[in-house]
Amino acid sequence: MQNNGFIKKLRKLAIEEGASVSGTAYIKDINPEFNLPKDQISGLDYAFSIGVKLSDSILDQITDHPTKLYFHHYRVANMFLDRLSFKISLCIENKGFKALAIPASQIIDWKKQSSYLSHKKIAVLSGLGWIGRNNLLINPEFGARLRLATVLTNLKLPEAKPLDFGCGECFACLSACPVKAIKEESDNFDHMACYNKLDEFRKNDFVGQHICGICVKACKGNPVNQGL
């Protein structure tokens, strides 16, 4: 593949700048799902996915509701990813290609919990993990303790092999969820029950935003199921 050296530099840049994981994917088939103008994403058929691990010490302090420290950490992680994805997009553009950095967390519809695109779906295509029972990306090493961001580009990137569902016999997130939104079958996640609980947290002024962290804390990954 042409530009192999440059792609390796992008991966190296991501890790050196603090990303915990990075991957690449061909995403033309899911472009129609994006909440972006068609002319803006035309030709941007590849994605560079990055993730940063959340702090164990902060997550481990969460009990039955999110903490203000977790809220701050959550925002800092998102800002970090936005800065890094911006830097990666500039590197790609400076090489003569198109690039579009998508914010790590800019929600368009809270009830649907949707943004411009699904970072986790792109991360799955990039070989970074699978969608777990808790409806989050589960990485073999870090579990659900990752925040994600994406750079779309017309630079031809390697297509990764997605990982198989690897939660196995782990059901830690089911017992942790305060509203039982998480089911044994990963495609039965109750979005509305989850949203209503997030809204309750917001109204009770625990953090002032629709975040939780309880099932994120519960999931630390299961590398055995991936043979890692």
Image (spheres, rainbow, N blue to C red):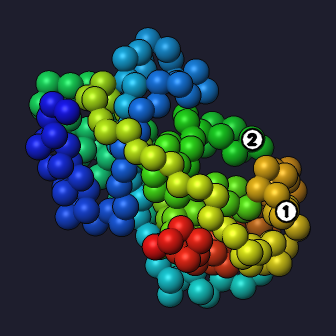
The residue under the point 77% across, 43% down is: 111
Query: How far apart, in angstroms, are the residues tagged by discs 1 and 2?
Result: 18 Å
Residue 110 position within the rendered picture, expressed as x and y whole percent measured from the top left: 71, 44
- Residue 111's tag is none
The residue under the point 26% across, 38% down is: 89
| Side of 68 where 127 appears, left or right | left
Q: Viewer-proximal residue, 218 or 213?
A: 218
Q: Amino acid at mark 1?
A: Lys
Residue 132 position within the rendered picture, expressed as x and y whole percent measured from the top left: 67, 60
| Side of 37 where 155 appears, left or right | left
Q: Viewer-proximal residue, 210 or 123?
A: 123
Choose mark 1 or mark 2, whichever is in front.
1
Q: Visible in this render: residue 54?
A: no
The residue under the point 46% across, 31% down is: 27
Q: Quickly name the residue at label 2.
A: 112
Q: Earlier in the sequence, mark 1 or mark 2?
A: 2
Q: Visible in this render: residue 2?
A: yes
Residue 99 position within the rendered picture, expressed as x and y whole percent measured from the top left: 29, 30
On-image quarter of the N terminus:
top left
Neighbours of disc 2 within 10 Å: few (<14), some (14-19), many (20+):
few
Label total for image: 2
The residue under the point 59% across, 55% down is: 164
Neighbours of disc 1 within 10 Å: few (<14), some (14-19), many (20+):
some
Q: Amino acid at mark 2?
A: Lys
Residue 177 position within the rendered picture, expressed as x and y whole percent measured from the top left: 80, 72
Q: Quickly name the residue at label 1.
A: 183
